[in-house]
Image (cartoon, rainbow, N blue to C red):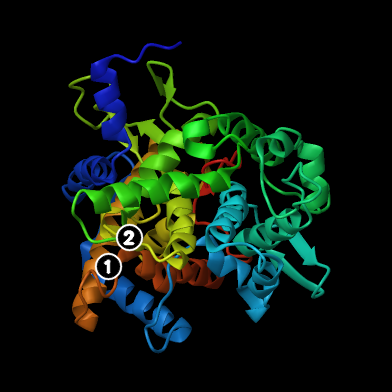
Amino acid sequence: MQTVYSDDRSAIALLRSPQTIRDRCSTLFTLAQSDQLQHFRCDLTQLDRVSDYVLQVTREQYPDLQIPFHSRWRHFEVGNISRLSHLNQALGHLSALEKAKAKFDLVIPSVLLDAGAGDRWQYLESDTGQVWGRSEGLAIASFHLFCQGAFSSNPDNLYQTDATALQQVTAESLAIGFQATTQNPLVGLEGRSHLLQKLGQTLQNPELFGQEARPGNLVDYLVERSLRVTRKGSSAGKLSATTVLSAVLEGLGEIWPGRITLSGINLGDVWPHSALPDREPSSQLVPFHKLSQWLTYSLLEPLQELGLEITDLNQMTGLPEYRNGGLCLDLGLLQVKDDAIWHQRHAPSSEVIIEWRALTVCLLDQIATTLRQQLALSETDLPLVKILQGGTWTAGRKIAATLRPGGPPPLQIESDGTVF
């Protein structure tokens, strides 16, 4: 068994905290404001312009400002097609708890398959005859795979995901399910299939995923934590969003390939940047946990359907991915210092991408504050998870489509299907 020393345990817990994401990103943001970063500078004079654009896009999508969470469930609803009605009908015989578990079983692999598809891949939905690309296409493809039992080893229950089935996923089987060919290429097929295989291995943790080794059994773990809070004297049925994130990071941390480790523990979406103070081995690391936070946002709705009140939403951060980051670049909040950056391909581990993502986290907070002031709404009324949906992600996609055919991100990213 790998020994984790107490100092390392503290460092790992620190790097899994949303507050550390903000703290480390804020250090880089402060350097950018004084023009001390290597690759980017910030121009906060553009903040009102960007916020106005985001508000305009938000009102187009949600005129009454009744904005849902930014989560995978929105992608399942694309095209106003009743896919979720089909799912709810299929799960109609189950208890509320078992329905929530089935929805976890759907959304966890779907989110893990969500990294950028590239601008050439498309998915033809046979039920509707419609063609979808990018995140929506990945969501719809994974939705249909789930409903067909592709992630279940139990022929009597197709609507589940379990370790046995996940470990049998290959790049070839995934290519068939996602209709990927040389003429219809999907970025990172090997990475995606490896991620699902690793998920299958990681589910062998009875405390989190039960004896059945299903991701859906995480519902039991989280409900138990909400009951523990109740027994300590808090109001019944409350669950912190950060508790959900902690469970995701602890339970799924080992799935990420080729990441930095500390005492043998995989840190996940955590990367070094030389501009951070070098005080101790982990002090130059910048955590993002983008897919883990996206997954956490996507797990909250099934928990709410169980009657749990989700708290601490605004302790979570914005998602540092290419739509939100692209919005900041395309509208001038961020500016590159060397035009060569536009013409190079960048790995997620490069300091170009780490800076871009870190500054995006901070700028999303700035945009959120400005929007709330414009609308005279509080953090509770308009949490960041709704601003992302309304919002910055949609605005980032819209401005990208306006500026570049096909709407690719402004920077060229070497994606392995597990980060973006």
- Residue extending farthest to the bottom is 64
The quadrant in which residue 197 appears is top right
Earlier along the polypeptide chain: callout 2 or callout 1?
A: 2
Where in the figure is residue 322, as x and y percent of width and height? 47, 54
The residue tagged with tag 1: helix, strand or loop?
helix
**Amino acid tagged 1:** Ala
Residue 160 as seen in the image, left or right of residue 234: right
x 23%, y 61%: residue: 235
x 35%, y 69%: residue: 387
In the picture shown, does residue 2 fall above or below 83?
A: above
Residue 54 as seen in the image, left or right of residue 280: right
Residue marked by disc 1 = 368
Image mark count: 2
x 79%, y 75%: residue: 128
Residue marked by disc 2 = 237
Is residue 357 in sight in this rendering? no
Work out whether residue 96 or residue 135 is closer to the camera in this orientation and state it: 96
